[in-house]
């Protein structure tokens, strides 16, 4: 019976994750700010028709694929962010689901195991994809002041804005190099500059690039000194980057406290096992104790994830 149950759970997990794999294979903080960026892009596109190209046709992902990508925190439009290829992440999720099914069938019973296994698989894939995307966006975020500095110096030297953006794609280090190369490619096929930067904002989710797109759109409509405008924006972005670094340093104390909260129960359990072993035997030999231990570990993991989410939100604010 346990072997048949394990095979059934593994098959269900394989089918569910295979659906996500097929979708991936076929697919390639402010609401007002996003609306402003879209309005500027639509205005310029209406004024200057975009040249026909297969790259302008918009996304090729269906609604179901986009929901799956959003659930897993996977962005197929940024292949450079993938430290691990998506098939590897799918296999990791499948392995985590199988382990959760095997452990849950013995400690929690069949009904709870059927619920825990898919959740563990999806959560594992979501965590890996989310870690990769956050790592990539943080690297791009750290390079924003350098990119704006290169753009400002190029404009002061007399180069047009489009050529300044192309220069960034040649001079700046990776990963911003690839992102600005895509911006230059969008401009080469006829997309307006602010629309190309708006697409960069949609890919990375960095508000600073939305500021840049809105700034360039307003400057194109109202005129003025572009170099001075970009210099003021670069100064503001430098302050934001410095503030984020300071917030991460202050969050180190909270992370250390969270680590202590996780370690202390295991230290206390080890001490109790050394002093009075029969207290721990109740959680290792008794089926009820085993279920309580598994539930306690699950609640501890949930609390750790909540603390991590609170720290990250505080850093963003």
Image (cartoon, rainbow, N blue to C red):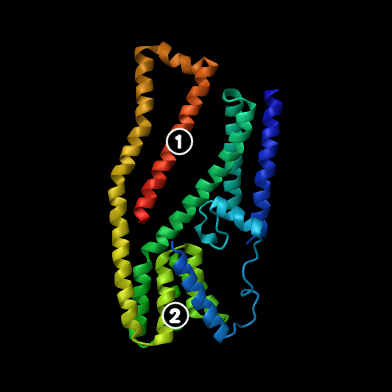
Q: Which residue is drawn at 52% across and 82% down?
A: 44
Query: How far is mark 2 from mark 1, CA to CA?
Result: 46 Å
Q: Nearest the camera: 213 or 26?
A: 213
List the single residue furthest toward the front.
32
Q: Nearest the camera: 211 or 53?
A: 211
Image position, residue 76 (x, y; %): 58, 60
Image position, residue 122 (x, y; %): 58, 44
| Lateral position of residue 5 relative to residue 89, left or right | right
| Residue underneath mark 1 | 301
Relative to 128, residue 163 above or below: below
Foreground tag (2 vs 1): 2
Q: Is residue 171 visible?
A: no
| Lateral position of residue 145 relative to residue 71, left or right | left
| Residue underneath mark 2 | 217
What count of labels does the image hold? 2
Contact between labelled residues 1 and 2, with CB atoms less than 8 Å apart: no
Q: Residues within 10 Å of mark 1 (few under 14, many from 20)?
A: few
Question: Splitting the image into 4 quarters, where does residue 98 fall?
Answer: top right
Q: Residue at x 46, y 82 (%)?
A: 162
Disc 1, SS: helix
Image position, residue 160 (x, y; %): 42, 86
Relative to 25, residue 222 above or below: below
Q: Quadrant of the C terminus?
A: bottom left
Image position, residue 232 (x, y; %): 30, 76
Lower position in the chain sequence, tag 2 or tag 1? 2
């Amino acid at each position: 019976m346990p072997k048949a149950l394990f095979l059934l759970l593994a098959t269900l997990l394989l089918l569910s994750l295979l659906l996500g794999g097929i979708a991936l294979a076929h697919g390639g903080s402010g609401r007002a700010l996003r609306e402003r960026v879209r309005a500027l892009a639509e205005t310029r596109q209406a004024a200057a028709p975009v040249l026909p190209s297969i790259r302008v046709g918009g996304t090729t992902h269906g609604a179901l694929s986009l929901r799956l990508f959003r659930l897993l925190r996977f962005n197929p439009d940024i292949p450079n962010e993938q430290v691990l290829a998506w098939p590897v992440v799918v296999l990791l999720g499948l392995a985590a689901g199988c382990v959760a099914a095997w452990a849950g069938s013995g400690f929690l019973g069949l009904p709870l195991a059927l619920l825990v296994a898919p959740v563990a698989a999806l959560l594992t894939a979501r965590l890996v994809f989310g870690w990769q995307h956050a790592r990539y966006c943080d690297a791009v975020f750290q390079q924003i002041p350098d990119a704006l500095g290169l753009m400002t110096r190029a404009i002061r030297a007399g180069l047009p804005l489009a050529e300044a953006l192309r220069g960034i794609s040649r001079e700046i280090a990776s990963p911003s190099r690839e992102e600005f190369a895509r911006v230059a490619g969008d401009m080469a096929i006829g997309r307006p500059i602010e629309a190309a930067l708006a697409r960069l904002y949609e890919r990375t989710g960095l508000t600073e690039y939305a500021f840049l797109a809105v700034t360039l759109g307003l400057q194109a409509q109202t005129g003025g000194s572009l170099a001075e405008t970009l210099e003021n924006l670069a100064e503001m972005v430098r302050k934001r980057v410095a503030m984020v670094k300071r917030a991460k340093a202050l969050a180190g104390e909270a992370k250390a406290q969270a680590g202590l909260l996780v370690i202390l129960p295991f230290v206390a359990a080890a001490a109790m096992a050394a002093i009075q072993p029969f207290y721990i035997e109740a959680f290792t030999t008794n089926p009820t104790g085993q279920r309580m231990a598994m539930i306690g570990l699950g609640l501890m993991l949930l609390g750790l994830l909540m603390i991590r989410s609170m720290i990250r939100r505080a850093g963003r604010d």
